[in-house]
Amino acid sequence: MLLFSDSGSECPPAFNRLTLDPPFIIQEYDEPILVNCTYISAEHDGIYWKVGNLTYDEEYRSYRVLSLPKPEWNTEAQCRIMLSETDECSKDLDITLYKKPDHVIVYPVSGNDPVEGEQYELQCDIVNVAPVQNLTVTWYRNDQIIKRDYFTNTTKTPESESSILPLNISREDDGAEFTCVAQLNLGPDGPQPPVMSNDNYTLSVHYCPLTITPPEIVVRYGDPVSVNCSTTSPDVIGIGWEDVETENVSDVTWTVDKLEYWNMNPCSLFCLSETPDIVSVSTLNISGPMVQGREFQLICNIINVAPVNSLKVKWYRNNETVHTEMFIDTSVTPKNVSSILKMTPGKDDNGAHFTCVAELHLGGNGPQPVPSEVSEPYIAVVDCPVTITPAEIVVRYGDPASANCSTSVSDAAGMGWEATFGGVGLTTAPTVHWAVKKLEVWDLQPLCFITLKNNDQCDKTLNITVYKTPDKVSILDNGPMVEGKEYHLKCDISDVVPADKVKVKWYRNDEYVQDMVSDTHVDPHNNNISAILTIIPKKDDNGANFTCVAELHLGENGPQPVPAATSEPYIAVVHCEFPVLFFQPAKHSPDVSHSDISWYYHETPINPFVPLTRNQSGKYRAEAENHVGKSSTSVDVTVEYGPSFSCNDRYEVEENGNFYSKCQPEGIPEPDTVWFKDGKQMMESPQIWRRQDSGEYSIVQERNYSREMISGENITLNCFAEGNPSPLVQWYHPPAVNVHTTRGQQSISISVTGATSTNAGVYICGATNKVGSMSRNVTLIMKGNNIISVQKYMK
């Protein structure tokens, strides 16, 4: 052996392959110690043991055995590695030596005999035991635990300790056996030394020769009570309750209808109970979550309970009992008490439910089952003492990504990143940085871990979402639509990640139709998804453009605006279940979905391509047939022609006569006329003519007009009306999907986008108020075509 000059330190994490077998010593004093110290790697200059100030065997070997035939109480041992000629590091051997007590003795503190109704104390001496901080003393009355003491003396050498048991003496204690049991608790990995106890100490109680029936009453505060007192002693000349004595009787009964007094006489007769008003669990002087590896305390507050010395508090972790506490407070009135649960949380405690149960154990005369109150559960949140910044990142596939991990704890042995790419080994720096230049892994989950000096380790995961916008968005159909029948449009979104974050929006022309989340049961390995739009098509859907937009909704940490991809428009073709006729300009056959059409006038077949004259207005019938079915319809056709007058140059009218029928314009639609006298416009023509009405008149027709349009042209028609009250202005026009209306205060505009032959026809603007109505017509003509005016859509 040599004297040793200490120059070592705790070994760095890289030397965690230095092992002790066994890793710690817990054994009885005077037994020998035998421990192997092993280090697998050969990258050192020597390995040896240091015990106190002495060293053992400095030769180079891969392992060392420490043998101490008789260790001392304060023996300290270290296994040391020589890193170089000047540097060393070490690992401590944890040694716990114990000694069972020489004696366990119980005796009364005072020399007086126990008397009913008085305070009395028993003392238990535990002689020459070590280590005292592992000692537990338990008191029993007969076979029931009534008190338990713990000790905090950290001295390793044997000491003597005492425990005091206070008693409220009653006659029921006469003959009771009291036992003091001393036990060393050396942990689950240590030996289990036998318990030591005294010979039973039996009380002999002096008491009055009265018998109270029942001998004990447990009653809820406010309930009724009745008790009988009797004696068999021949020397008694009278008995009574509370200073009221009755002579020449051997028993007397005391009755109360409503017991509302906590302190009764004799106090040993009654036990008034009150279950707690509130039982609640909260943290003790700590805010925030539990920290893994750090002591954490929960407190159970029990409000307004009596009697306290009958209270038992049980702590549960989920459904498992983890701690039980009894109380020795002898107060009989309600009090507030609390119980503290100390714990060192681990990762498995995250999400665990901790509850506190307050039970009143009132003995065999008390209520059964035992009355109890249960707290609301405290749900544990266990945090690892590291902070990842940012806690979540959303990154496009192939882009760079990075995050920092830091800690504020002072006893960290080191921290680092564990990741497939960009991992960082254990370092003592308070902050470690993780980064990749090009993220090309879909399910990467980097872990930031920390190792504390007590070898506890925990970690947190960086939440990464890697996304990719779709390669293609397209709409698939299953043939032409049929009016009135359910139809499905399918939107295929190919190669998008993450697929479960896709929201699909459908549009008809520029009008939003519906949005939906894609199939919620997305296979995480299948990045091709689809969404179905269900519609029941109408005639107006023919030619409509349906588009599908796929958006990635990646949360507030994702890119803004949301990345989206849009399909090419799908142009709907709607077939009628039976042909529907659309009347169009002559010289052009109607589009009735490839139908054969026959026209009739007064049930006589006609050629629909021969221009109509003004005398051919009337009802026409068209009959159409295709492979789907057969249909016919009737329509009133009005052949329009321009207005004309057939008036003389001069008229003579009798005074008070009527001139209206003598000069009227002809035309369809009927022309409106404006009268002028001597070049000035009149509000209306004279109805009854008088001599002062003689003069020169002119009549001007306010005719409707027509205009030609070119295929694909954009056209806007404006209509304005005045009146009092303000009139309602409305356009009536041939139905088409490319016609849109814009309304002003007393005006209305109609726009035709990309004009086709279906837009040809009469456009009527009508104005109405409660006084009357008026209309004007505009006829749109596709250049080079004649017009058939169909007014069946007028309201």
Image (spheres, rainbow, N blue to C red):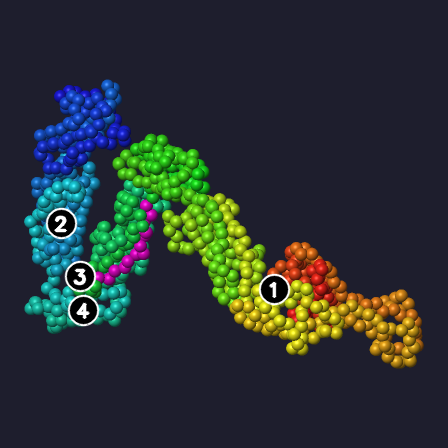
Amino acid of disc 1: Asp
Quick check: 487 left or right of 463?
right
* Mark 2 or mark 3, whichever is nearer to me: 3
Look at the image and give the residue range highlighted in magenta.
370-382
Callout count: 4
Which tag, 2 or 4, sits closer to the chain's start?
Answer: 2
Helix, strand or loop for disc 2: strand
Residue 376 painted magenta: yes
The residue that disc 3 covers is 363
Which tag, 4 or 1, sits closer to the chain's start?
Answer: 4
Kindly report the distance in space between the C-alpha atoms of the residues bearing marks 1 and 3: 98 Å
Q: Which mark is residue 122?
A: 2
Q: Which mark is residue 591?
A: 1
Quarter of the view holding residue 751: bottom right
For the point 12% across and 60% down, the residue is 172
The residue that disc 4 covers is 227
Horizontal and vertical percent for residue 338? 28, 52
Mark 2–mark 4 CB contact (< 8 Å): no
Relative to the observer, which residue lies in front, 140 or 71? 71
